[in-house]
């Protein structure tokens, strides 16, 4: 995981943070000597909450905090994220243990929380440095990562004490309305309207499925791998958006980022994880494997809706970040191309919708079946 110098716009008072942590962390929770001033580095990944490495004598900790500036209601809620991790860690061994939560904004200017660091490589656009996997090992890694998502969805919600995160029936409708509103609010000059896509999602939404805990940002770059066996996940990070809802939406949101071999050059330009490698499943194979693992069933017509929603949601997130760049709330130059990503995603959503409208009733009703690694996916998109 890449940690470099702290960007000037994201700097904070290290001495104030260290003093607060030393006085508020429960004895033994940190596992390091908190009496000294840590070296602070910033992780480059992520487009939402900011993540820092705190290097103390004897070990490292991780600090999470929101970016500076105004945020939409409910976003960047450190207390919620801290609570989810603290309670879920007792039931899912992949969740990092928390150390302390600070809601006093006078300390560093924003709320923050600190957690223990999980040691291991994290896949990003490419496999981590030093990690080399052949085709079969890559296939094993892919299966294990999808199985991790299935394990999360199998957790007993009531046992975690997090059932109150859910708002009952109507989850799918709330997601469509909420993300549509976010896009309209974040839209900037020159970006597409997405109105036809949002209208189609609203009119064709599926019925609610039984709810589970959902991560809502499940990607390879939130997975920590075992240093001794990089095909095996040992950690799952970034619980900011976790809630109780439709598990197939969680899968769809994850596949919104899935760029595979056969995708066009514009899609490949925005790849953020190594899902293009030989041995990785195609999107359709991922859905089939997940269904076989969990017992879920979904038809091709139903999955087309989920697929479009997952892509639309990624587009909204990209547009929100692009709006921050356009309005000067961030100077990170990697965000200046996010407007192009939004346009590419809108085209892809429209293409899937057109294909769905031409499906025969028989084809639409076919269930996506068990995956066969190496079978060519019928879900590959034409070049963008």
Image (spheres, grey):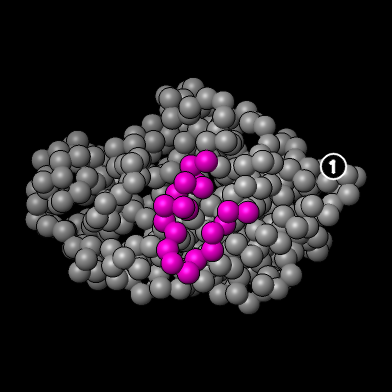
Q: In screen coordinates, is 357 left or right of 82?
A: right
Residue 25 is situated, as x and y percent measured from the top left of the image, at 18, 39
Drawn side of residue 307 relative to residue 337, left or right:
right
Is residue 136 placed above or below 107 in the rendered structure?
A: below
User: Residue 266 location, x and y as percent?
Assistant: 60, 74
For the question of whether residue 358 can be seen, the reply is yes
Residue to which mark 1 is pinned: 365
Residue at x-position 83% and y-position 54%: 358
Q: Which of 329 and 21 is in front in this view?
A: 329
**Residue stretch rendered in magenta on the structure:** 177-196
Q: Which residue is drawn at 88% across and 49% down?
A: 360
Check the image and report above or below for 217 versus 263: above
Q: Which secondary structure class fits the magenta region best?
A: helix
Judged from this view, the residue extending furthest toward the bottom is: 265
Q: What element carries label 1?
A: loop
Q: Position of residue 28 (x, y in %)?
A: 22, 39
Above or below 316: residue 339 = below
**Where, quadrant-wise, is the C terminus in this rendering?**
bottom right
Rendered location of residue 208, percent (x, y) = 63, 31
């Amino acid at each position: 995981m890449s940690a470099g110098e702290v960007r000037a716009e994201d700097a904070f008072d290290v001495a104030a943070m260290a003093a607060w942590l030393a006085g508020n962390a429960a004895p033994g929770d940190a596992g390091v000597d908190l009496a000294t001033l840590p070296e602070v580095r910033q992780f480059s990944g992520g487009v939402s909450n900011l993540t820092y490495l705190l290097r103390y004598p004897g070990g490292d900790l991780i600090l999470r905090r929101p970016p500076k500036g105004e945020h939409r209601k409910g976003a960047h809620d450190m207390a919620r994220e801290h609570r989810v991790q603290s309670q879920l860690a007792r039931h899912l061994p992949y969740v990092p243990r928390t150390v302390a939560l600070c809601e006093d904004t006078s300390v560093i200017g924003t709320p923050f929380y600190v957690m223990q660091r999980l040691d291991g490589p994290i896949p990003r656009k490419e496999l981590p440095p030093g990690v080399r996997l052949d085709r079969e090992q890559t296939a094993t890694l892919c299966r294990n990562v999808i199985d991790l998502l299935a394990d999360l969805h199998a957790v007993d919600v009531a046992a975690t004490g997090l059932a109150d995160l859910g708002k009952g029936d109507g989850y799918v409708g709330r997601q469509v309305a909420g993300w549509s509103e976010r896009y309209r609010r974040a839209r900037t000059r020159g970006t597409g309207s997405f109105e036809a896509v949002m209208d189609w999602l609203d009119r064709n939404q599926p019925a609610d499925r039984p709810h589970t805990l959902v991560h809502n940002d499940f990607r390879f770059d939130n997975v920590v791998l075992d240093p001794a066996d990089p095909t095996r996940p040992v950690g799952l990070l970034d619980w900011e958006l976790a809630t109780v809802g439709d598990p197939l939406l969680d899968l769809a949101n994850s596949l919104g980022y899935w760029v595979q071999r056969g995708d066009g050059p514009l899609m490949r330009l925005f790849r953020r994880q190594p899902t293009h490698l030989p041995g990785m499943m195609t999107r359709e194979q991922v859905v089939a494997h997940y269904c076989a693992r969990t017992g879920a069933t979904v038809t091709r017509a139903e999955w087309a809706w989920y697929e479009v929603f997952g892509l639309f949601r990624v587009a909204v997130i990209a547009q929100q970040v692009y709006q921050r760049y356009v309005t000067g709330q961030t100077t990170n130059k990697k965000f200046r191309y996010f407007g192009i990503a939004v346009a590419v995603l809108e085209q892809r959503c429209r293409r899937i919708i057109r294909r769905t409208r031409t499906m025969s009733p028989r084809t639409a009703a076919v269930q996506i079946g068990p995956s066969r690694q190496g079978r060519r996916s019928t879900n590959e998109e034409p070049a963008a």
